[in-house]
Amino acid sequence: MLMQRVKYRAGFLVIILIVIMALSGCSKDDDLPANTLKLTSDKSNSAAIKLTFAYNWTGADGKAGIYEEMLHKYIDANKNNVIIELEATPGDEHMAKMKVEIASETTPDLFMYWAGSANIKPMVDAQVIVSMEDYLLVSKAVKKQQWSESAWDSFKVGDKHYGLPVESFKGFFMYNKTIFDQYKLMVPKTYTELKQVAKVLRDNHIIPLAMSSKGGNPGHLFYDQIRDQLPDGVSDASDLGSTFKFDTASFRSAAAIIDEMRSNQMFPEDTIENGDWAPSVSTYNEGKAAMIYTFPWMIDAIKPEIVHVSEFADFPKMDNAVKDPAGFTIGGISMGLVINKKSFENQAKQAEIVKFADYLVSDEMFRALGKASMSPAKNVELETKDLNPLFIKYVDFTAKKISYPPVYSTFPTQDTVIVYNYQMDSLFAGAVKPGEFISTIQKAIDYKNKK
């Protein structure tokens, strides 16, 4: 009898399911985020090579338990040859930590980081990270063809690539069938229908959409999903890094729609308190919200009893849409592994760095992380018996949807991304009007472009 498997190979249905799936700071440890946890393997072997690895899948992250178990498995198995210090900082705090360490020239030997030119190019320009072409010349276990070209492109600067793609993603829209049945509602296929459904839900003290924004999360991706339906939305986003034009019709229209949704009470009353990843699913998890737009890294956070009454649906189609959301979603590569250039060029360290990097992107590691509903960026098979049932449904539902990358990946600098995220919080909270939202971000881009 054949074992059921999920094969990750971007773009095709195979056997059962497919997943298509700026630097400033200080130099002292006291200036690192308070939640940074440093764990070091046994230092009794003074002859061993010493490496440092920084990552953010820790704490409440659904991948943390499995990931850190796999890290310690490697550390224990190789303790005679290498001492590895782990620096674990949860979520977006990891980015703040890395900025401090890069600026103070205490960059870890290897670290996880976000994809996209705004994130990667500053480190390339500062010669902080090594190209993967150099790494692949040394590695005997890792081959470029193990990833799709589109996955590699997420870490491309010029004609080279500067990260090993690790985590892929696709957004999905889901609703609570019990709530819809209780109020005899049909799943909204258009924005007009969404407004009608939202009114009935609000009249019955149900939050229509579990959507919010804190530090931009997850609201900026919801905004992307709306904008990319609109005329020139996809091209306006993809060209932002060369046109430096945020003040366009598609960006303005999407902001106006978000503001109207807020006015129609589609979101939780306090979008800051309910913002960021974990809080963003809480109202849906508690049965207080009827619909949610979220991403695979939140799948394991959704309660089994809520999973049981949840169904996938296409994102509602906006009034002026030219792209049908039934055929696309927001997705791409979120995280990857990067390697310190100076460390890599240290011949005393290079062999152990390559060996550890090989392990961090091995099929063994990806299969383990699949059990925590992580979508591998690499082409790899996963055994369905090990997977969350909601993750399997997610894979099946999103398999035929093409994905457009979030616009943050095309912003010219990380500083402008930060402005964008804070403005997104204000837009969802009603603290700024759409026009001010657009103009503030455009001014930030203009300022950075002139420097």
Image (cartoon, rainbow, N blue to C red):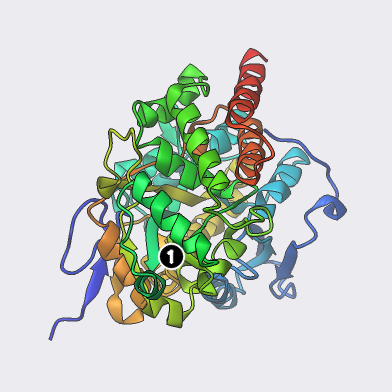
Residue at far left of view: 1
User: Left or right of 164: which side holds 98?
Assistant: right
Give the answer, above or below, for where 383 lies relative to 32: below
Please state the total of marks drawn on the protein image: 1
Neighbor class of circle 1 (other Cα within 10 Å; few <14, some 14-19, many 20+) is: many
Q: Quadrant of residue 370?
A: bottom left
Is residue 421 visible in the rendered image? The answer is: yes
Give the answer, above or below, for where 238 lies relative to 170: above
- Residue 39, percent from left and from top: 72, 70
**Front-most of residues 96 and 189:** 189
Give the answer, above or below, for where 198 lies relative to 425: below
Query: Split into 4 quadrants, where in the image is the C terminus?
Result: top right
- Residue 226, percent from left and from top: 41, 41
Q: Name the residue under label 1.
A: 374
Q: Is mark 1 on a helix, strand or loop?
A: loop
- Residue 109, percent from left and from top: 63, 52
Q: Give, as a three-letter code, the residue at label 1.
A: Met
Residue at far top of view: 450
Query: Split into 4 quadrants, where in the image is the N terminus?
Result: bottom left
User: Left or right of 286: which side holds 394?
Assistant: left
User: Left or right of 31: which side holds 98?
Assistant: left
Q: Residue at left 50%, top 51%?
A: 335
- Residue 373, percent from left and from top: 42, 69
Is residue 163 visible in the rendered image? The answer is: no
Q: Residue at left 24%, top 73%?
A: 5
Give the answer, above or below, for where 73 lies relative to 107: below
